[in-house]
Amino acid sequence: MTTLDSTMVLGGVHHVTAITSSAQHIYNFFTNILGLRLAKLTVNQDDYETYHLYFTDEEGNVGTDMTFFDFPGIDAGTHGANSIDRASFRVPTDASLIYWQERFQEAGVPHGKIRTRFGEETLRFEDFDGQHYQLISDSRNVGVPSGKPWQLSNVAKEHAITGLGPVIVRVANYDVLRTIVKEVFGFRETAHEGNAHLFEVTEGGNGGAVILVESQGETTAQQGYGTIHHMALRTKNSETLAYWIERIKEHGLPHSGLVDRFYFSSEYVRVAPGVLFEIATDTPGIGALEMAKAGRSKVDSYEEALITSGFWIDETKDEAGLALSLPPHLFPDDEATKAKTAAALRPLDTSDAQRDRRKDKLWTFDDVLTN
């Protein structure tokens, strides 16, 4: 097996995608309680009857987006071994966790106590589906930088969520996944506590980490709403992604090959039963860059597109989230197909996605579920 090219090292966590029972409720929860912006309202590109919602920081930065599918008719999932169990969100300081503990208490959001893991303060919480999350303090963090608070949120800016932190994976056969994470993906083990092992890549820190938990003997998780579908790791651009596709192929792991998601380009890799990793580009996807090169995008030039969030290529930052956006590379000027696709979706109102929430009172769990 070839040694990992040091110029091709992965850049940390790109995004995490989960499954929700309700696109409307998850929109309410993320914008009005967690304070993240809806950067893109679109469809699952492999299942057009399923919404795909992307929640990010102010700029739609890579490494800040938590995304959701709402598969029609899907059952509730269960947590356990062989799953991506929990996503983390970064907040600026330890004091931020106290702020959020009080916010969750007032809003009626299920949450635990502040505790220390691998030297960082964390606070676990859940949404209405029992989806697992945690907040993690950046007080002592060094490494992969985080993003920028959403400017229209009613969350205090000094305590706002700024990006994704370590993703927690539970596996029955830890030794196999440890080998893959280290030998194929280039992570290094930097700490362990009990049955939990911290792995970091590139600059490390909260934005460059995964935590693998040995879960032998646990009940196997079942995917459904309230569980995570996959997690993505960062690579710079289409050229570095091509390197990773060949590397994954060389190591014989089940994989997808190149997939153009428009907002980024990807490769999907099955690393363990029930555990799907993705490698996704920091730059916009092939279709988005082709649109920019042809002068049909919302940015002024191809060069600008290369340094712009993929979410702002087919609609501007100020338009984002207000209406359904269908990737042009999948729906090229086909208005009939677009209309048919939209008609098959459940009702979802995101018309206030750009509303200034800075003076809003805090939404409660009941507000989330009844609005």
Image (cartoon, rainbow, N blue to C red):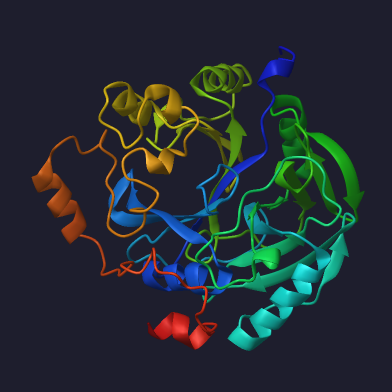
Residue 23 lies, in percent from the top left, at 38, 66
Q: What residue do we see at 13% from left, 53% from top? A: 339
Instruction: Reply above or below: 225 against 46.
Output: below
Q: What residue do we see at 38% from left, 64% from top? A: 353
- Residue 5 seen from this side: yes
Residue 129 lies, in percent from the top left, at 52, 73
302 left or right of 218 in image: left
Instruction: Reply above or below: 313 against 72.
Output: above
- Residue 108 seen from this side: no
133 left or right of 280 in image: right
Residue 288 lies, in percent from the top left, at 35, 31
Question: Is 282 or 178 nearer to us in this picture?
Answer: 282
104 left or right of 40 in image: right
Residue 74 lies, in percent from the top left, at 39, 64
Question: Is 72 or 328 nearer to us in this picture?
Answer: 328
Residue farthest to the left, as pictured: 336
Q: Quadrant of residue 291?
A: top left
- Where the C terminus falls, by quadrant? bottom left
